[in-house]
Image (spheres, grey):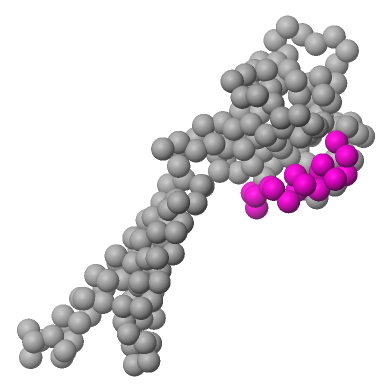
Amino acid sequence: MSELQRIFTVSVQASTKDVERLRARLGSSVRVLTAPTVEARRVVEALGREPVPEVLLAPVRFPDVDRGHRLDELVRRHAVEDRYRDLVVVADPATLTLLLRVLAPDQLPESGPVTEVGLPRAPRPVPLGKAAAGGVGLAVVAGVLSPVLAPWVLPALVALAGLAFLVVPGRRYVGQALLIATAVSVVVTLMAIAGSARFPGAW
């Protein structure tokens, strides 16, 4: 199942409230491409993010025929570097209109100075190494707490959290990692029991 990488276009005419609402929607990982103008700088400062100035985003009086395609290439190049971060483009309305016509012609632009479109991307890969290490750690913690807490309680809680994350858009990889960690912790716990005096085969 494919997901969408969020691309936000912000007009230099955006109000402070528009920018504040966008700032609240942005993820922890975001890149802001901006036209090298005073108006664009005002918007970027309100976003509170480090800007990446791009000369191609500067307003032009008479745009070239292929300007829209060059804008599309610029945005996609930055998007491909990290498909799991948000991308913000700050420029004048005419430049953003040309960009959106090529970047996402099948997506109706939102009314107002801030528009969100999405580029298809594969789901984020599951960090198998971290999941396995977390499973071992979970088994150790469950074993330490076994005198006061049943060994199955912590793995069950982690498994429930994993199932919950599976239905959260963009967080399926977290749910999958938690379920893998639970499975690893169960295997480690069974191996520990098999090697202990509680297991008849070890007598």
What x and y, as percent, mark residue 52? 75, 38
Relative to 74, say whether 181 is above or below: below
Looking at the image, residue 112 sits to the left or right of residue 13; the answer is: left
Instruction: Let me know if residue 17 is in the magenta part.
Output: yes
- Give the residue at x 34% y 67%: 182
Q: Quadrant of the N terminus?
A: top left
In this rendering, is residue 69 above or below 118? Answer: above
Residue 131, can we see it?
no
Q: In the figure, residue 43 lies in which quadrant? A: top right
Instruction: Look at the image and say whether residue 22 sits in the magenta stretch.
Output: yes
* Quadrant of image for the C terminus: bottom left
Q: Give the residues drawn in magenta, as a range.
A: 14-29
Residue 79 % position (x, y): 60, 34
Whether 134 is drawn above or below 43: the answer is below
Task: Give the dominant element type of the magenta stretch: helix, strand or loop.
Answer: helix
Name the residue nearer the viewer: 176 or 165: 165
Residue drawn 39% across the image and 81% down it: 141
- Up-down relation of residue 166 to residue 191 (above or below): above
* Closest to the observer, 118 or 82: 118
Q: Position of residue 153 (x, y in %)?
A: 35, 78
